[in-house]
């Protein structure tokens, strides 16, 4: 089975409120077997017109597991906590089966 990778771009407006979201999201990710690969490190654009203030990449055992995380009550609570703290673009990508 191919891994599922959740990729999120966040623009944080209220860093203090965003901390609540991060705590809730981290717990939900762990519950669904996800692990952070990238979490807000320095970003350097090598090509194109990207403007990514904060990037997060989370690995799950499958795309289906990533979707279960996203649709879970735990992550819905995290999204509610994030509502006024940040805007986010998020997608899930199927990894290669090696």
Image (spheres, grey):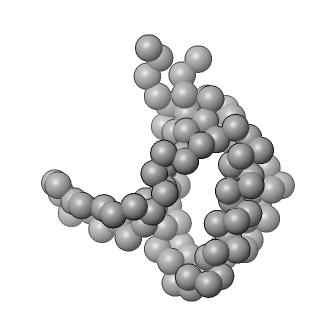
Horizontally, residue 43 falls left or right of residue 82, namely left
What residue appears at the point 67 percent right and 32 percent down from the top-left corner? 64
Point out the image quarter for the C terminus.
top left
What residue appears at the point 70 percent right and 74 percent down from the top-left corner? 20
User: Can you say whether 47 is above or below 83 in the image?
Assistant: above
What residue appears at the point 59 percent right and 17 percent down from the top-left corner? 1
Task: Residue 59: name its quadrant.
Answer: top right
Q: Would you say residue 96 is visible in this rendering?
A: yes
Horizontally, residue 63 falls left or right of residue 41, namely right
Q: Measuring from the top left, give residue 28's x and y in whole percent.
A: 74, 52
Q: Measuring from the top left, give residue 87's x and y in whole percent.
A: 53, 73
Of residues 55 and 68, which is closer to you in this image?
Answer: 55
Horizontally, residue 96 falls left or right of residue 78, namely left
Task: Residue 35: name its quadrant.
Answer: top right
Q: Measuring from the top left, give residue 80's x and y in whole percent.
A: 74, 71
User: Can you say whether 71 is above or below 44 in the image?
Assistant: above
């Amino acid at each position: 089975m191919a891994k599922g990778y959740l990729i999120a771009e966040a623009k944080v407006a209220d860093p203090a409120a965003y901390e609540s979201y991060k705590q809730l999201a981290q717990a939900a990710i762990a519950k669904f077997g996800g692990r952070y690969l990238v979490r807000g490190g320095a970003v350097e654009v090598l090509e194109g017109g990207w403007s990514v203030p904060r990037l997060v990449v989370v690995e799950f055992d499958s795309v289906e597991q990533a979707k279960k995380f996203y649709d879970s009550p735990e992550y819905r609570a995290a999204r509610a906590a994030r509502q006024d703290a940040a805007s986010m673009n998020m997608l899930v990508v199927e990894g290669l089966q090696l």
